[in-house]
Image: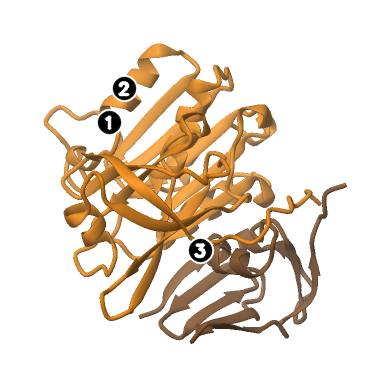
């Protein structure tokens, strides 16, 4: 079964990998060029893993799977990941 | 863009259950003490992980219901899903004194803090009230005077979570209004809304766009999509409508 959620649901796993609040990181879509915070994306979670999609054009921004102690991240759907680092 | 706090990677921690309280027939609040909790903001959630004796693990996300002011105690309100892998354990099996593995707090996108101001519009479908309740509790604890409206859709009177506390909060200030819609069954004499949320209802309840409200919508995916699309159709800026969806739990 596949659940349509949002980027907030994928954030726990992403924040186990990246040391930032990943819901506020902006991802620019390779397909339509729109930038959205990951918290505002559409996320589909199922047994095989998680797909984070662009809320504008539905392109897959991130594919994420976790297996046997490793994370697999396919991020070819995003062009830029913009992290507003603290001053 | 907003700054993104460097948090360090999240890791799992153990909390001890110090209280458990039934909210409705299908929901329960579980209060944990978390010795290594780094503090949260209203609207954030945690991931809970259960491990079976054979090593099989299941993770689910649950919203934090308690305000930051209560930390290091953190309360989750969990809705029991009959075919769920995690929620029946949390609502039926977990006891005071047990330990629970979780990581968090997670998410700075769906967050409201008193200093962010308002006016504030909260739109809840079913157990989508949980992170919004953290905002209302934080608002009260911080002594905030931000004008706030909550539109809360539930199937019936008996399924309204935090009903008494919401009544008390409304009774304590004129700056908070709570509007219920009961979509399936209404008590005798009910004069409130009795249909699913729609654009007309939001037009009546929401702040007008020229007040530039901050808006938070939480509920099942179809509920959130309807509410968010209606708010945008009413002229609100999409970026000010923050949404959080959860998986299929029936209709709110």
Distance from the alpha carbon under mark 3 to that under mark 2: 31 Å
Residue that appears at 50% across and 17% down: B175
* Crowd tier of the residue under label 2, counting other residues whose Cα lies within 10 Å: few below 14, some 14–19, many 20 or above: few
Color style of the picture: by chain
Marks 2 and 1 sit apart, C-alpha to C-alpha, by 6 Å
The relative height of residue B133 versus residue B230 in the rendered view (above or below) is above
Label 1 neighbourhood size at 10 Å, few (<14), some (14-19), many (20+)? some
Quadrant in the rendering for residue B165: top left
Q: Which mark is residue A9?
A: 3
**Visual hue assigned to chain A:** brown
Q: Which chain is orange?
A: B
Q: Residue at x 45, y 86 (%)?
A: A48
Q: Report the residue marked by disc 1.
A: B163
Residue position marked by numbered label 2 in the rendering: B167
Q: Secondary structure at mark 1?
A: helix
The correct choice, above or below, for B38 with respect to B54 in the image is: above
Residue B183 in view: no
Secondary structure of the residue carrying numbered label 3: helix
Q: Position of residue B234 (x, y in %)?
A: 59, 44
- Which residue is the extreme one toward the left? B188
User: Where is residue B172 shown, x and y percent of the image?
Assistant: 40, 12
Residue B181 located left or right of residue B40:
left
């Amino acid at each position: 079964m596949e659940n349509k959620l949002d980027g907030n649901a994928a954030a726990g796993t992403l924040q186990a990998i990246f040391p930032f609040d990943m819901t506020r990181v902006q991802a620019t879509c390779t397909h339509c060029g729109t930038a959205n915070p990951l918290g505002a994306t559409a996320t589909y979670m199922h047994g095989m893993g998680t797909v984070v999609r662009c809320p504008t054009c539905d392109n897959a921004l991130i594919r994420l799977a976790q297996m046997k102690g490793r994370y697999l991240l396919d991020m070819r759907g995003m062009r830029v990941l913009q992290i507003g680092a603290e001053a | 863009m907003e700054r993104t706090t460097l948090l360090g990677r999240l890791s799992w921690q153990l909390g001890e259950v110090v209280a458990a309280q039934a909210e409705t027939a299908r929901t329960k609040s579980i209060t944990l003490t978390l010795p290594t909790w780094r503090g949260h903001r209203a609207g954030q959630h945690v991931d809970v992980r259960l491990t079976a004796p054979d090593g099989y693990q299941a993770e689910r996300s649950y919203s934090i219901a308690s305000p930051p002011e209560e930390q290091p105690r953190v309360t989750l309100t969990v809705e029991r899903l009959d075919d769920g892998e995690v929620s029946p354990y949390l609502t039926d099996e977990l006891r005071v004194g047990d330990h629970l593995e979780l990581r968090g707090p997670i998410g700075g996108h769906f967050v409201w803090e008193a200093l962010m101001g308002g006016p504030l519009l909260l739109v809840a479908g079913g157990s989508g009230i949980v992170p919004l309740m953290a905002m209302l509790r934080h608002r009260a604890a911080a002594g905030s005077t931000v004008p706030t409206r909550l539109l809360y859709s539930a199937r019936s009177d008996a399924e309204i979570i935090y009903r008494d506390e919401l009544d008390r909060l409304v009774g304590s200030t004129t700056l908070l209004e709570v509007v219920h819609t009961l979509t399936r069954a209404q008590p005798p004499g009910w004069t409130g809304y009795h249909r699913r949320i729609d654009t007309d209802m939001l037009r009546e309840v929401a702040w007008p766009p020229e007040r530039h409200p901050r808006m938070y919508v939480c509920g099942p995916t179809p509920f959130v999509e309807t509410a968010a699309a209606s708010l945008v159709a009413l002229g609100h800026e999409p970026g000010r409508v923050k949404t959080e969806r959860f998986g299929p739990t029936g209709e709110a």
